[in-house]
């Protein structure tokens, strides 16, 4: 029996543990307002160990595809490409070839880290008031659905660029698992079913409605064998001809037609916008944490600077004195996060359009100054600082990033390591299904308001050809001698940054095994309140935190952390228990 069809059946049976949760929500009406990608419960800790290679992705089918490439002698980049193509099929709400991504690749033979930018770009016909109406910003969901929110997809061109530089297997071989699965079908998972049921306004366009919903208007049930021959045809074309048809051929034409002819919310993308897209090789951003170097993607990702800043601030405190789950450690983490986010919201943007002090934001002297602002006993309002050697005035502004993304961590037999975060932005993106894949809504990651009340420009305002700021935080942590120690990242919108930083903190500073660090309760503090998962703090510790002056909200925080720790020649993988991913290797 075909391996991928077998996996589909095994996967369906394995996920039957979620049946009770599905039954509890099956009668719920879809929510009418904007919601994060909904939480769908947690499983037992998911871990694996290996000696030679490992892949940790958001779905067992994708992990199997990656492992197949690694077993054939492929590189981590080869495996990442195969996994991404499968994720776009089995996890279409989160990522795919209609979106964008950031990829870090450590080349062992070069002893060097490379950062690939596949972020979407704004069409050339936009202006800074693109999301304004009568002097006010549009409503988020109003802007999201339809062609108006679609940026030029960057994932495919980035993956092609990475393969040309760092791949080993033939390009067309990387497409075969996804093609087979699209043709033969896969069992709809509980998570895909619940998101189709509970995310707002999924079935508002005919193509996506016909694909994911039955004649009764309800999402297709868990276990339904879903086939996607259109996606298979798209992948066959890309496998044979590379990305040319996607950016200058029939796929580009279909994308532009769908965007411009959307009946309710048309966009302004052109064929020229598609043809002009280029993936970019960026300088990674590296900061210090304890004895380690913590490296992430540069702009337009804000992940590298903000994860680095949180950890760089925290290292100025005696972390060994505070226990995981204590009010004291949670307070320090929240305060460091608030300070780092104040800087992020002020300075981070596309560095091709505005000056961004990448190294200044993680400069040790600057972070020591930021750490000195933290009181050990009470919460302190966070304001943006003045990064080292940066004199330009900046205006603070936020953008409504939604937590629908995917992350994978991969290490191959050659010692190469990939950390890749990939997204279409909110759940099911723009709701436009074209050629078997969903188009992103990444333009809504720009600040809707281009100027402050005193008319000063916001760094992350929309501009022609610009890439919106992102919180995607693919991260590789290095030992003092320069070898990889941890490969990690997560989905989760702007909360990605805290999910990633907390996991690094617990694993490297508190000596938690990586799978346990992933499973531990999440904590976020991204600019207004401290959010904690119910198991992150006891009732008593939460009350202590509140007495320090924090407003605390207890809620499920839907990360999708996937990591590989490299310790004494062993690979230790962990997949987030909050989602349906897996860690596999040999």
Image (cartoon, rainbow, N blue to C red):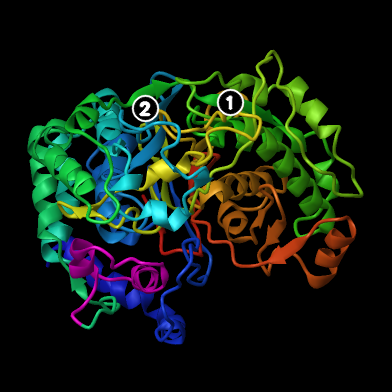
User: Which span of residues is magenta-colored?
Assistant: 186-215
Sequence-first tag of 2 and 1: 1
Instruction: Name the one closer to the observer, 245 or 568.
Output: 245
Q: Which of marks 2 and 1 is in front?
A: 2
Badge 1: residue crowd in 10 Å (few <14, some 14–19, many ≥20): many
- Using the rendered view, name the quadrant where residue 398 is placed: top right
Residue 109 visible in this rendered orientation of the protein: yes
Q: Where is residue 429 in the image (x, y as percent from the top left)?
A: 35, 53
In the image, is 531 to the left or to the right of 279?
A: right
Task: Judge from the rendering whether residue 76 lies leftward or rightward of residue 249; answer left or right.
Answer: right
Can you name the residue that lies furthest to the right here?
A: 377
Q: Residue 202: within the magenta? A: yes
Q: In this view, does 446 lie above or below 524?
A: above
Which residue has dot 1 on it? 286
Q: Residue at x 43, y 45 (%)?
A: 444
Residue 579 sits above or below residue 221 on the image: above
Q: Is residue 372 above or below residue 112?
A: below
Q: Give the label on residue 96, or none.
A: none
Spot occupied by residue 475 in the image (x, y as percentages of width and height): 52, 37
Q: Quadrant of the N terminus?
A: bottom left
Q: What element carries label 1?
A: strand
Query: Mark on residue 464?
Result: 2
Residue 23 in percent (x, y) is at 42, 86
Q: Is residue 460 magenta?
A: no
């Amino acid at each position: 029996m075909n391996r991928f069809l077998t996996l589909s059946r095994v996967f369906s049976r394995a996920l039957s543990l979620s049946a009770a949760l599905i039954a509890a929500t099956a009668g719920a009406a879809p929510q009418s307002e904007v919601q994060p990608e909904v939480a769908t419960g947690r499983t037992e800790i998911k871990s694996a160990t290996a000696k030679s290679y490992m892949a940790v992705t958001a779905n067992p089918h994708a992990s199997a595809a990656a492992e197949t490439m690694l077993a054939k002698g492929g590189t981590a980049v080869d495996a990442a490409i195969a996994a991404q193509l499968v994720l776009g099929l089995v996890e279409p709400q989160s990522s795919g070839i209609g979106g964008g991504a950031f990829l870090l690749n450590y080349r062992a033979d070069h002893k060097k880290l490379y950062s690939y930018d596949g972020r979407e770009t704004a069409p050339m016909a936009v202006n800074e008031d693109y999301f304004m109406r009568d002097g006010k910003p549009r409503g988020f969901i109003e802007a999201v659905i339809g062609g108006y929110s679609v940026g030029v997809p960057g994932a495919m061109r980035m993956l092609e660029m990475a393969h040309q530089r760092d791949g080993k297997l033939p390009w067309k071989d990387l497409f075969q698992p996804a093609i087979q699965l699209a043709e033969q079908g896969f069992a709809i998972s509980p998570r895909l079913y619940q998101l189709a049921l509970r995310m707002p306004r999924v079935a508002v366009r005919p193509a996506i409605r016909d694909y994911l919903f039955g004649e009764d208007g309800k999402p297709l049930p868990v276990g339904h064998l879903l086939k996607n021959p259109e996606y298979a045809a798209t992948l066959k074309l890309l496998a044979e001809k590379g990305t040319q048809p996607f950016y200058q051929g029939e796929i580009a034409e279909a994308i532009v037609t769908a965007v411009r002819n959307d009946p309710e919310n048309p966009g302004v993308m052109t064929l020229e916008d598609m043809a002009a897209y280029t993936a970019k090789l960026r300088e990674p951003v590296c900061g210090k944490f304890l004895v380690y170097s913590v490296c992430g993607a540069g702009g337009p990702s804000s992940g590298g600077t903000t994860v680095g800043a949180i950890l760089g601030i925290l290292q100025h405190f005696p972390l060994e004195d505070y226990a995981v789950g204590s009010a004291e450690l949670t307070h320090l983490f929240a305060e460091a996060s608030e300070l780092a986010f104040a800087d992020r919201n002020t300075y981070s943007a596309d560095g091709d359009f505005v000056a961004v002090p990448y190294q200044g934001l993680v400069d040790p002297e600057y972070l020591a100054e930021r750490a000195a602002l933290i009181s050990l006993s009470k919460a302190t309002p966070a304001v943006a600082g003045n990064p080292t050697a940066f004199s330009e005035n900046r205006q603070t502004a936020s953008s409504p990033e939604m937590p629908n993304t995917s992350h994978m961590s991969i290490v191959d037999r050659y010692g190469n390591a990939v950390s890749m975060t990939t997204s279409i932005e909110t759940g099911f993106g723009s709701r436009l299904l074209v050629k078997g894949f969903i188009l992103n809504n990444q333009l809504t990651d720009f600040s809707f308001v281009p100027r402050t009340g005193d008319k000063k420009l916001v760094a992350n305002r929309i501009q022609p050809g610009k890439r919106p700021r992102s919180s995607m935080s693919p991260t590789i942590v290095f030992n003092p001698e320069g070898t990889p120690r941890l490969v990690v990242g997560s989905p989760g919108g702007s909360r990605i940054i805290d999910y990633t930083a907390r996991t690094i903190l617990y694993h490297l500073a508190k000596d938690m095994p990586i799978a346990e660090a992933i499973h531990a309760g999440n904590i976020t503090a991204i600019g207004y309140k401290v959010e904690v998962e119910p198991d992150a703090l006891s009732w008593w510790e939460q009350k202590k935190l509140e007495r320090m002056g924090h407003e605390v909200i207890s809620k499920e925080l839907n990360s999708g952390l996937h990591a590989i720790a490299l310790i004494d020649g062993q690979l230790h993988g962990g997949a987030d228990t909050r989602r349906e991913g897996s860690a596999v290797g040999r």
